[in-house]
């Protein structure tokens, strides 16, 4: 990391910018604490007795079920595509990530449409066996906690798959090969060697999946599952108690921080040497033949079918019946609202990420490093919690500004920030800043500090060094960061529902509103648009990561181990 003997004005500017950004990210959290301490009436005792216990228990059961499905599916498929050779493996290697392109709320209403009593599955069962009513046979209820666990599990497993697959790819081939030479079977190799080495990566993937699970509001609403997120939404809007919602949001935050602590606690003292060095090579795969190859292919194909193909085919079928709406004013306006907000938020997240990463590159000291880390915690904050923390300070600012402008100039500004969508962009930036920052920080890490030193020697200050050297090198990284942030903003539902201006619809809110009215066909076209947009970065991420790994190992030359 680059260190300079003295800080110039430009260096201090970047540090001040980083500290200011961290303060803006922490502002919603501070607002939540303040609101929760000053609720109107004795709300907390009522919530503690009637709402919180049930919501907390339901949330824990949901997270337990989702964690189990995502870990088994993600780890199992990652092992098969990484350590086994069978027909179709290379295609499945990247295709296993495509369920990430489909938001959980879209998959939820798709399966409600498919599996409910009036859906095609139960209709086929009645036609085959001659049943006439639902009392003649038993079929699992999709609108239940079990249905929510199933849907979230088949959508969120790629988080575990991605991190575990990366861990398996970089594990020491020599370690695994020695184990095989000593007679270790694939079963023992997996459970005794590979799985313990991959525990930190698995913990990270599960924690990411559970954070997304805790953030969800669309799927749990469709399934009638009263989680903490749903309770915050219901307490705020239906019971008109912002203070009570803030107190429930505070309980959610404590759960998030506990989840983060457990993830770090589970990885404590786990520092494994992957044995990479200069002589590392990809692990030797097991060749599968016959029924074993067919079984491996089926096991990898099943989550793709459940998490992407089934809802995708349903959406395509329903959307094809309403193609006349594609060029209608309502759909184009909604799509433009989503696109414009997501584009502005993505641009801001990239600019802020560059500011944070560059400030840390210039001066990696304790206070600044802590501020940058705090600025990156937004991804762990559920959208409903973030919306409460943003609404109050922005509303107070709007009211203050409106009062001053009315008194001084006789002009009524109204809700200038909240009414213009600024609050929603603010929420997007805070929530998805970590996604962009991770990409940008990694890009800066690959630029040698010697370039900075050479630029300083030639008389360039930090601003000129950034604009003339770093940014041209970082163009692919910045594009990738912007793309990922853009798609996340397009899919975001909880914060969008609660912070959107009046009479302002996005693709996500249109899907939610239509599905809430059971108008599934009306929700199909905007849902399909979200999925198609989301496919672009997912396929790019999957294929580029695999290509990068293959290229790195094919070009690596043996050399001395330092």
Image (tube, rainbow, N blue to C red):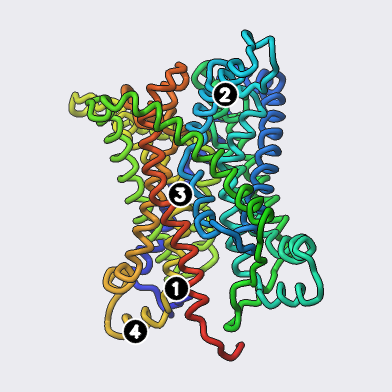
Nearer the observer, 346 or 133: 133
Dot 2 or dot 3, earlier in sequence? 3
Instruction: Kindly state the secondary structure of the residue where label 4 is placed.
Output: helix
Q: Position of residue 92 (x, y in %)?
A: 53, 54
Q: Position of residue 62 (x, y in %)?
A: 67, 34
Q: Nearer the viewer, residue 230 or 335?
A: 335
Residue 121 - label: 2
> Residue tagged by mark 4?
454
Q: Nearer the viewer, mark 4 or mark 3?
A: 4
- Residue 147 vs 545, above or below: the answer is above
Q: Estimate the spatial distance between the alpha carbons at disc 2 and disc 1, rounded to whole Å.
A: 52 Å
- Tag 2 secondary structure: helix
Residue 401: x percent and y percent? 30, 31
Q: CA distance from mark 4 to mark 1?
A: 16 Å
The residue that mark 1 highlights is 446
The crowd level at tag 4 (other Cα within 10 Å; few <14, some 14-19, many 20+) is few
First in sequence: mark 4 vs mark 1: 1
- Give the label on residue 23, or none: 3
**First along the sequence among labels 2 and 4:** 2
Question: How many numbered marks appear?
Answer: 4
Residue 391's spot in the image, x, y percent?
A: 43, 31
- Which of labels 4 and 1 is toward the front? 1
- Circle nearer the N terminus (1, 3): 3
For mark 3, does the 10 Å Cα neighbourhood hold few (<14), some (14 to 19), or many (20 or more) residues? Answer: some
């Amino acid at each position: 990391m680059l260190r300079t003997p003295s800080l110039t004005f430009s260096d201090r500017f970047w540090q001040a910018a980083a500290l200011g950004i961290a303060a803006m990210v922490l502002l919603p959290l501070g607002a939540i604490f303040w609101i929760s301490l000053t609720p109107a009436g004795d709300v907390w005792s009522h919530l503690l007795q009637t709402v919180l216990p049930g919501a907390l228990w339901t949330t824990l059961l949901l997270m337990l079920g989702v964690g189990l499905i995502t870990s088994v599916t993600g780890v199992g498929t990652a092992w098969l595509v990484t350590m086994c050779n069978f027909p179709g493996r290379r295609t499945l290697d990247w295709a296993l990530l495509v369920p990430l392109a489909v938001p959980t709320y879209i998959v939820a209403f798709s399966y409600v449409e498919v599996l409910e009593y009036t859906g095609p599955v139960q209709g086929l069962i009645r036609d085959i066996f001659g049943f006439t009513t639902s009392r003649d046979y038993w079929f699992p209820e999709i609108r239940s906690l079990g249905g929510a666990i199933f849907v979230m599990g088949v959508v969120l497993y790629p988080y575990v798959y991605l991190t575990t697959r990366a861990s398996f790819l970089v594990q020491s081939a020599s370690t695994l090969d020695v184990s095989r030479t000593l007679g270790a079977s694939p079963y023992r190799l997996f459970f005794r060697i590979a799985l313990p080495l991959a525990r930190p990566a698995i913990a990270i993937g599960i924690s990411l999946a559970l954070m997304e699970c805790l953030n969800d509001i669309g799927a749990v609403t469709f399934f009638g599952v009263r989680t903490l997120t749903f309770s915050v939404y219901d307490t705020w809007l239906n019971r008109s108690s912002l203070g009570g919602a803030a107190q429930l949001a505070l309980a959610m935050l404590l759960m998030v921080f506990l989840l983060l602590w457990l993830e770090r606690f589970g990885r404590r003292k786990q520092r494994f040497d992957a044995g990479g060095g200069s002589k590392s090579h990809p692990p030797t795969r097991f060749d599968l033949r016959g029924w074993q190859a067919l079984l491996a292919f089926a096991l990898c194909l099943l989550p793709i079918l459940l998490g992407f193909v089934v809802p995708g085919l349903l959406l395509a079928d329903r959307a094809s019946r309403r193609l006349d709406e594609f060029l209608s004013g309502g759909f184009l306006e909604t799509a433009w609202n989503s696109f414009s907000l997501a584009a502005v938020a993505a641009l801001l997240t990239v600019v802020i990420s560059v500011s944070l990463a560059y400030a840390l590159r210039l001066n990696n000291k304790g206070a600044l490093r802590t501020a940058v880390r705090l600025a990156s915690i937004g991804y762990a904050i559920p959208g409903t919690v973030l919306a409460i923390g943003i609404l109050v300070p922005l509303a107070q600012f709007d009211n203050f500004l409106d009062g001053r402008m009315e008194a001084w100039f006789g002009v009524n500004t109204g809700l200038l920030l909240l009414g213009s969508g600024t609050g929603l962009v603010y929420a997007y930036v805070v929530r998805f800043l970590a996604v962009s920052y991770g990409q940008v920080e990694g890009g800066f890490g690959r630029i040698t500090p010697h370039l900075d030193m050479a630029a300083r020697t030639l008389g360039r200050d930090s601003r000129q060094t950034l604009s003339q050297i770093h940014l041209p090198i970082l163009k692919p990284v910045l594009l990738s960061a912007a793309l990922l942030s853009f798609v996340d903003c397009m899919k975001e539902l909880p914060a969008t529902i609660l912070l959107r201006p009046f009479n302002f619809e996005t693709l996500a809110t249109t899907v939610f509103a239509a599905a809430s009215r059971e108008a599934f066909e009306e929700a199909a076209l905007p849902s399909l648009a979200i999925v198609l947009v989301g496919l672009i970065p997912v396929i790019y991420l999957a294929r580029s990561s695999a290509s990068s790994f293959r290229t790195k190992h094919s070009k690596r030359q043996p050399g001395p181990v330092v």
